[in-house]
Amino acid sequence: MDEKDRQFIEGIFLRQGEQFKQQLEATSERFTQQLDARSEQLTRQLEATSERFTRQLEATSERFTQQLAAATEDFKHHVSVVADNFDDKIGLLAEGQQMLAERMDRMEERLDNRIDQVEKRLGQVEANLTKKIDSVAADLSAHRADTEAHHGVYRVKES
């Protein structure tokens, strides 16, 4: 191979290399453009998906907030009903306690009256009994005196 052939081959390689380089640059440019286009498309899709997700999340959050508010209202109502019921029962209990206290006061008053009557009656019985005992003692004393006056016929023995 001589110098001319070598230069000819090098020329072919240079032209081919230049063409290859141009084709490679063109392909690289097209690839970069396609990649950029695809990247933009994916970015738009991602943004759209993100927006949908955000809207769904906001809607879900709103529903949850509404359900929580409704449950809170239901709970407040239930607690209010239970508290009212409890107040009613406490009222009934207090009313029953008051009635019982009044009944006990009436019973105590009646019992005091009865005790006073019994004490009065006992005082009367004691006075009556004292009179009778005094009367029996007087009769006994008179009988003894009479018996001793007739000491020959009757004798009183103390046992």
Image (cartoon, helix red, strand yellow):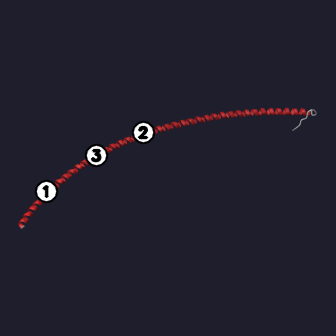
Front: mark 2 or 1: 1
Sequence-earlier tag: 2 or 3: 3
Give the Cα distance between marks 2 and 1: 74 Å
Q: Quadrant of the C terminus?
A: top right
Secondary structure found at label 1: helix
Left or right, 7 with respect to 52, comes to left
Q: Quadrant of the N terminus?
A: bottom left
Please rate how many residues cluster around mark 1, counting C-alpha atoms within 10 Å: few if below 14, some from 14 to 19, many from 20. few
Q: How far from the left and from the top, in percent, is residue 26?
A: 14, 55
Q: How far from the left and from the top, in percent, is residue 94?
A: 55, 37
What residue is drawn where x is 68% and y is 33%? 114
Please rate how many residues cluster around mark 2, counting C-alpha atoms within 10 Å: few if below 14, some from 14 to 19, many from 20. few
Secondary structure found at label 3: helix
Q: Looking at the image, which is closer to me, 93 or 50?
A: 50
What residue is drawn where x is 48% and y is 38%? 82
Left or right, 11 with respect to 83, comes to left
Give the Cα distance between marks 3 and 1: 41 Å
Q: Looking at the image, which is closer to me, 30 or 136?
A: 30
Q: Amino acid at mark 3?
A: Glu
Which residue corresponds to mark 2? 74
Which residue corresponds to mark 3? 51
Q: Amino acid at mark 2?
A: Asp
Which residue corresponds to mark 1? 23
Q: Looking at the image, which is closer to me, 152 or 65?
A: 152
Secondary structure found at label 2: helix
What residue is drawn where x is 74% and y is 34%? 123
Q: How far from the left and from the top, in percent, is residue 117?
A: 70, 32
